[in-house]
Image: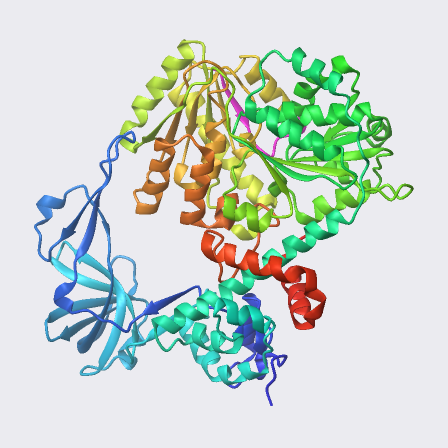
């Protein structure tokens, strides 16, 4: 008899090879199959007539970002002369049709097997085309009626519509579509999962009855049945709501549990010297903005408490978070404690070291820099400083900080969950039973819903104002036809004693290699190729520099120093300059393959220029004219507000893409969307009601532990 724990290899129809393919998807036992939810559903329950089909056409007239894409419908048989230069995006169509004829042919060009069919309903005919599926002639017999779903395209040679690679089903129903792997299709998964749905009775409901009733949610067993094979769209919606609520509820519980645990700990109580802090502010060569003052005061008041500060300082690119954090370091030093400042890259760590040293050295703060390039013999001397600025090197096993009371983590989402936890654990003072205060900083604006869910255990301080005198950065989308104009503009800027960045995307990014050696080599390849092109062909008379992640630390430092000292006109770089790099004289940011980056990342790149009173520009180079790409890039043209851009990116791409595949600790949710504000609020409110009596619900506690393990959350 099958149970939830039974290996998938024991299921009828699943042999060793099939089980291995399932294993590639993380499916080992029956329970895994039941919880392998569809990534989408194809609603085949409302087929249209063949005569209703049309094509959507996009005209790529967005030249330098000042024109919008135009859309129109293409009636069947429209002359080709009216469409010259257009790109085509086919409509997904669902039809109920009979197979008139079907045959296999060979493509003369690619030696590819083509299966061609003529389909018919009462309104007309359409041709269907499949690639390398010759077995279809055994499945689709002339005279049989099927539901077909596929993309409609237009064949200019024959002036006919074609239904390209359509799927086919007997019934007009709602079909689940799963994430697939080689040799394992959604059709295979549907065949395996459907007979197993009678086993949902073995699954225990873990949500308390009071929440199920209050929120009008489906029982988990019914939800699982309906998410795989829904009876209708209404029941599918109810199943999605239940399973999405469940994830957001568990995520909220975890965040609230973190906060509760933090509040039960003790931290060093820092006595503030207000007169010293006023002297520091008076020594600055600029006036603090109101947002900087407010954020600094919130942080300083937290340090006065005996419970650990756990705060996120979120600020626009170039808004001045560094000086706010420096005030906290000064307060910690004055109380005879240490601070550690952790940065994601050596470039940023070095820049912080130089900038903070200028700010705090006059006040007697001893500052050390610690990166992986330092020898062990130097480490002990460095770790005795008042402030240690470094990369992940600060969490090496043999490194200890005798009086650590403040941890500052710059761009927290760039560090793994275990790395952050390791630093906190390392800093615990066993003699006093105290743990350090924690300040996280980010220049990547985080949408409110994401902050509530993922960073909900952190108090939030915002810096939205930019320093006085900064001009708005002008952003333009550059089409391939206008590339030469952009190059001329950049050259004119450099003749005017300005400098420029050129950012290269990763070539052929593969998530399975992200963060590894292959990833770095691909980035290097992209940057080196662009460097060769610009230095030898486009700008042979200009000074071109190169920066990428595979360079040695001293070479990176030299490249950035030369650029800052105006010894380089154009710096070709990978995404290593995304955060923190400060070159006031740079006025042009040119981004190749802009469609390969999210809005949040593009906004970070743009923030590398416009850091002085000079007028600055950001050019987004792209050869993609997809609707999503144009929508995102146009948002960059229209807005310089990182917070609104992050909201749009969350809606379009989701939280995983928002922060990139390289980031660690981002919640991996199967059904929920962190952009669903209403559901997030409902789940959060329910979690707040039940957190105090969590021990009364053993099934919920067990599920929470399982959820934390699966989602790799702190």
x and y percentages locating residue 371 in the rendered image: 73, 31
x and y percentages locating residue 367 in the rendered image: 77, 22
* Pick the front one: 140 or 233: 233
| 536 with respect to 287 (left or right) | left
As for residue 549 lying within the magenta part, the answer is: yes
Whether 248 is drawn above or below 142: the answer is: above
Whether 71 is drawn above or below 295: the answer is: below
x and y percentages locating residue 65 in the rendered image: 29, 31
Q: Among all residues in the image, which is located at the extreme right?
A: 431
- Residue displayed at 32% across by 71% down: 133
As for residue 458 lying within the magenta part, the answer is: no
- Residue displayed at 67% across by 48% down: 417
- Residue displayed at 66% across by 19% down: 355
Question: Which color scheme is applied?
Answer: rainbow
In the picture, the quarter occupied by the N terminus is: bottom right
* Pick the front one: 523 or 609: 609
x and y percentages locating residue 149 in the rendered image: 27, 68
**Where are the magenta residues, as a range?**
543-555
- Residue displayed at 76% across by 40% down: 395
Q: Among all residues in the image, which is located at the extreme top?
A: 496
Q: Is residue 185 visible?
A: no
Image quadrant of residue 113? bottom left
Q: Is residue 363 visible?
A: yes
Image quadrant of residue 237? bottom left
* Pick the front one: 542 or 4: 4
């Amino acid at each position: 008899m099958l149970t939830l724990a039974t290996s998938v290899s024991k299921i009828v129809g699943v042999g060793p090879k099939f089980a291995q393919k399932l294993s590639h998807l993380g499916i080992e036992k029956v329970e895994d199959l039941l919880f392998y939810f569809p990534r989408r559903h194809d609603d085949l329950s409302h087929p249209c007539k063949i005569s209703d089909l049309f094509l959507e056409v996009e005209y790529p007239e967005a030249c330098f970002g000042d024109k919008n894409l135009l859309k129109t419908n293409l009636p069947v048989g429209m002359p080709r002369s009216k469409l010259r230069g257009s790109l085509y995006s086919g409509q997904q169509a669902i039809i109920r049709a009979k197979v008139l004829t079907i045959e296999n042919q060979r493509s003369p060009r690619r030696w590819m097997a083509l299966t061609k069919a003529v389909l018919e309903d009462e309104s007309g005919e359409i041709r269907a085309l499949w690639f390398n599926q010759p077995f279809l002639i055994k499945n689709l017999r002339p005279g049989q009626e099927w539901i077909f779903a596929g993309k409609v395209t237009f064949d200019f040679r024959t002036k006919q519509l074609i239904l390209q690679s359509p799927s086919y089903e007997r019934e007009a129903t709602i079909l689940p579509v799963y994430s697939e792997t080689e040799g394992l299709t959604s059709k295979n998964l549907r065949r395996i999962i459907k007979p197993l749905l009678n086993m949902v009775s073995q699954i225990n409901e873990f949500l308390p009855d009071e929440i199920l009733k209050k929120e009008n949610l489906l029982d988990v067993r019914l939800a699982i049945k309906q998410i795989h094979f829904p009876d209708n769209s209404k029941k599918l919606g109810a199943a999605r709501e239940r399973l999405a609520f469940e994830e957001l509820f568990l995520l909220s519980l975890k965040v609230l549990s973190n906060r509760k645990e933090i509040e039960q700990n003790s931290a060093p109580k820092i006595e503030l010297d207000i007169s010293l802090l006023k002297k520091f502010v008076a020594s600055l060569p600029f006036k603090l903005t109101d947002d900087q003052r407010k954020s600094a005061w919130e942080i300083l008041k937290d340090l006065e408490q005996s419970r650990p500060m756990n705060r996120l300082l979120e600020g626009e690119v170039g808004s001045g978070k560094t000086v706010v954090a420096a005030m906290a370091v000064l307060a910690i030093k004055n109380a005879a404690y240490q601070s550690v400042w952790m940065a994601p890259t050596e470039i940023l760590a070095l820049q912080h070291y130089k900038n903070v040293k200028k700010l705090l050295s006059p006040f007697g703060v001893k500052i050390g820099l610690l990166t992986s390039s330092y020898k062990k013999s130097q480490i002990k001397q460095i770790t005795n400083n008042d402030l240690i600025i470094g990369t992940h090197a600060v969490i090496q096993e043999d490194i200890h900080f005798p009086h650590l009371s403040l941890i500052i983590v710059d761009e927290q989402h760039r560090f793994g969950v275990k790395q952050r936890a390791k630093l906190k654990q390392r800093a615990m003072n066993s003699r006093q039973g105290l743990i350090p205060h924690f300040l996280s900083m980010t220049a990547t604006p985080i949408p409110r819903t994401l902050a509530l869910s993922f960073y909900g255990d952190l108090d939030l301080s915002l810096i939205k104002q930019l320093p006085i005198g900064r001009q708005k950065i002008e952003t333009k989308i550059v089409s391939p036809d206008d590339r030469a104009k952009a190059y001329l503009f950049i050259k004119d800027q450099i003749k005017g004693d300005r400098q420029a960045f050129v950012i290269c995307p990763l070539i052929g990014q593969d998530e399975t290699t992200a963060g590894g050696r292959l990833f770095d080599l691909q980035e290097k390849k992209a940057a080196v190729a662009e460097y060769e092109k610009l230095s030898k062909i486009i700008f042979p008379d200009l000074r071109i520099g190169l920066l990428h992640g595979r360079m040695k630390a001293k070479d990176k430092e030299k490249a950035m120093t030369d650029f800052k000292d105006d010894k380089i006109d154009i710096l070709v770089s990978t995404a290593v300059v995304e955060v923190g790099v400060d070159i006031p004289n740079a006025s042009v940011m040119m981004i190749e393959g802009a469609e390969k980056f999210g809005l949040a990342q593009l906004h970070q790149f743009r923030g590398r220029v416009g850091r002085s009173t000079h007028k600055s520009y950001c050019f987004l180079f792209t050869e993609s004219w997809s609707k999503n790409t144009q929508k995102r890039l146009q948002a960059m043209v229209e807005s310089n507000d990182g917070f609104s851009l992050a909201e749009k990116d969350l809606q379009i791409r989701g939280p995983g893409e928002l922060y990139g595949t390289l980031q660690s600790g981002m919640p991996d949710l199967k059904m929920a969307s962190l952009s669903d504000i209403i559901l997030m609020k409902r789940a959060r409110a329910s979690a707040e009601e039940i957190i105090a009596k969590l021990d009364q619900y053993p099934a919920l506690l067990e599920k929470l532990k399982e959820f934390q393990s699966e989602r790799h959350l702190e």
